[in-house]
Image: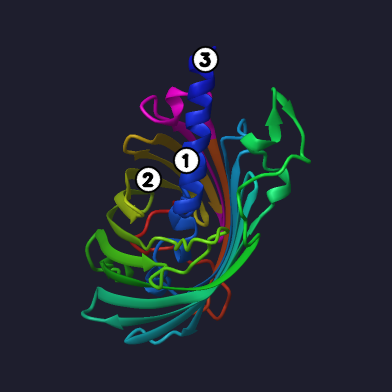
Amino acid sequence: MKNLLLNILFLLVLMTNVFAQQDAGLTQAYANPLNLNPAIMGANNFLKVMVNHKSQLALIDGGYSSSSLGVIYPISLKRSKKIDGGINIQNDKGGAFQKFDASLALGYDVKLSKAGNLSFALIGGFGQKTLNAAILTFDEQYINGEFSAANAITEDYSFTKREYGDIGFGLMWYYNPYIFESAGKVNCFVGLSGYHLNSPSKSFLATDYRIPRRFGVQAGIKIVGGKKMDISPNIRLNLQGGMQEIMPGLCLDYRVVQGMKLSLGSYYRLKGATAFLVGVEYRGMTFGYSHDLYSKTGIGKYMPTAAADQITFTYKYDLAKKDGSYTDDNSPFSSF
């Protein structure tokens, strides 16, 4: 019994630390590219509306959840000098903590060769983090094993709400010969992103605490296997606050008929979790679902049934098609 209590205590401390120091990680990261690398905006001419929701560890005081709404809009469609804009609104909840962020992004895409492009984007916005201290309990409130909210506590929460500004960037090189009918069948990309470059303060205590900078590297290829199938191996690396996340993955897209595509995929978060993904796209509307199983060397060691689920919806419309006809997404990026 004692070991069980110690394990639960360790897990609670671990999850509180992760929630405080790291951004919410989305398994289907390419379903919300503004949170992964804003430079991805320049890859095509689509107006995109993206909705994401992820919930995890529901057994721990309601668990942790992250919801977002994003929009990408091509401002200029010139292939030599393309400009894109985006907006992302995100709300994260975990225990007594809640975080809200609203960001604007502006990207510039330059054609380097017939099929090679370089995209650069800036993203910045406003954030607010709140603490519901009323639902917290402390050691001082327990006397002889009895709890009383009237007992005084020594913790000094100088703030229960913090506002902050935030800035970031994205850089992406991608090679996309598939947009030309007579060209090759392999697309590829490599990108670099950075968030919280100003390390904004969001401490609830009198001592200052700043959000650690987050840097990410993304790379992958898309192998176009004829008119029916695409295979997209890729990898993501995130570094933040001394913590490291490495996620190799593979996505398979199968075109059932014109305008309809089925997707299957899997990611492996090193020493973290294994994720399985499934999605369906019909004429620009995509629904995705993913399920994460935590590793036995991490959280799964203490909670064998712990899991995470993410659902996504994306609507895309090709603004370059004035007749409103459907266009397949030929960008080198994975569906997830």
Residue at x 62% of width, y 30% of height: 59
48, 301: nearer the viewer: 301
Element type at mark 3: helix
Which residue, given by chain and number where applicable, does mark 2 sit on?
Answer: 251
Which residue, given by chain and number where applicable, does mark 1 sit on?
Answer: 277
Q: Could one spot residue 253 in this view of the protein?
A: yes
Which residue, given by chain and number where applicable, does mark 3 sit on?
Answer: 2
Range shown magenta: 282-307
Quadrant where the N terminus is found in the figure:
top right
Residue at x 78% of width, y 41% of height: 150
| Sooner in the amino-acid sequence: mark 1 or mark 3 | 3
Question: Marks 3 and 1: in contact by CB < 8 Å?
Answer: no
Q: Is residue 158 above or below residue 139?
A: below
Residue at x 46% of width, y 45% of height: 18
Residue 81 sits in which quadrant? Answer: bottom left
State how far apart marks 1 and 3 are (Cα): 38 Å
Q: Position of residue 327 (x, y in %)?
A: 48, 67
| Sooner in the amino-acid sequence: mark 2 or mark 3 | 3
- Amino acid type of the residue tagged 3 in the rendering: Lys
- Amino acid type of the residue tagged 1 in the rendering: Leu
Residue at x 47% of width, y 45% of height: 17
Element type at mark 2: strand
